[in-house]
Amino acid sequence: MSRGEYTAQWNPAVPARTLRLDDGTSLRYVRTGQGRPLLLLHTLRTQLDYFEQLVPRLAAGYDVIAVDLPGHGQSDIPKAAYDEPMFRAAIRELVVKLDLQDLTIAGESIGGVLALTLAAELPERVARVVALNPYDYGEEFGGGIRRARHGWIIGLYAIFGPYTIAPKPLLAAVMRGGFHDAQALPASLLDELHRTGLRPGYGRAQYALLKHWRSWEAARSRYAGIRAPVTLVYGSDDWSNGAERERDRSGIPGARYFEIPAAGHFSALEAPATVAGIILADQGGTTP
């Protein structure tokens, strides 16, 4: 079972920290670099190590904060709804407690949705957003993931419950379904995700998140209130279809759209140099 040792391997100079929320939940995060603050939000069944290839690229231009969402990584696993409002409230509190101002938020998948809803909720703090493959569609339990290679496994997950994808081969199959090149998933990260999944209560939290899929679709209703500049970034092989992407683009005032060729849903892992370039260019309000 992982206790967070993996993070120290790729980020040895900066120890991970914890922040205690008002409800007693502790969130693990790393903070490194110089410049305006940049908050990185990962997706479900992953953790802040998802950004291990992005953080070093971004730290020269930003004060980078990468956090384990509640119920993920080495953050606490509270008994909670694990819906979009729960995650948004937790990260909102982190932003306020760290007093992050002039903030850029970049997130992948559900992290992309949270980046957008937090921008709507904290207009005085959030200056810009980069939403990577926002997961706000699907129309059933794990609906978007079911479109992926080996997506049938999520159907079993819906029926048989939290530990269906605990075995490493099934976890690998689901994760690789989010890549254009299925071999692009780093073996070391897969090992770490598997070890983290052995934490008591972890499977229950992940199942609860997918059970509340409607909350991620409902989050779209908040996008119209965003005032910060938004860049929407999609892998060419993301699970979303063209109509769903256009719905987000047209629903966010002034949103810019960028597509990464030969990339899937997990673009930050599959195309880290391109994603880092987009985020760094976004400092000046342009996209490469």
Image (tube, rainbow, N blue to C red):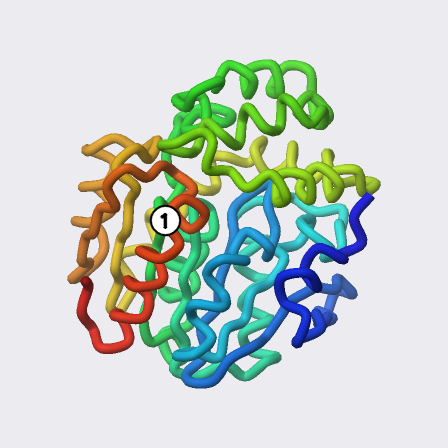
Residue 168: x %, y % from top left? 69, 27
| Residue denoted by label 1 | 271
The structure residue drawn at horizontal position 42% and vertical position 51%, both measured from the top left corner, is 268
Relative side of 15 to 183, left or right: right
Relative side of 259 to 34, left or right: left
Is residue 113 at all visible to an observer of this figure? Answer: no
Give the tally of numbered discs: 1
Mark 1 neighbour density, 10 Å: few (under 14) some (14–19) many (20 or more): many
| Above/below status of 77 relative to 279 | above
Assign the C terminus to one quadrant of the image: bottom left
Relative side of 26 to 221, left or right: right
Q: Quadrant of residue 262?
A: top left
| Above/below status of 246 relative to 36 | above
Residue 27: x %, y % from top left? 69, 63
| Above/below status of 284 relative to 175 | below
Residue 50: x %, y % from top left? 55, 51
The structure residue drawn at horizontal position 18% and vertical position 41%, both measured from the top left corner, is 246
| Amino acid type assigned to the residue bearing label 1 in the image | Ala
Residue 29: x %, y % from top left? 64, 67
Q: Nearer the viewer, residue 127 or 56?
A: 56
Relative side of 164 to 56, left or right: right
Q: Quadrant of residue 66?
A: bottom right
Is residue 276 at all visible to an observer of this figure? Answer: yes
| Above/below status of 4 relative to 214 | below
Assign the N terminus to one quadrant of the image: top right
The structure residue drawn at horizontal position 54% and vertical position 74%, both measured from the top left corner, is 95
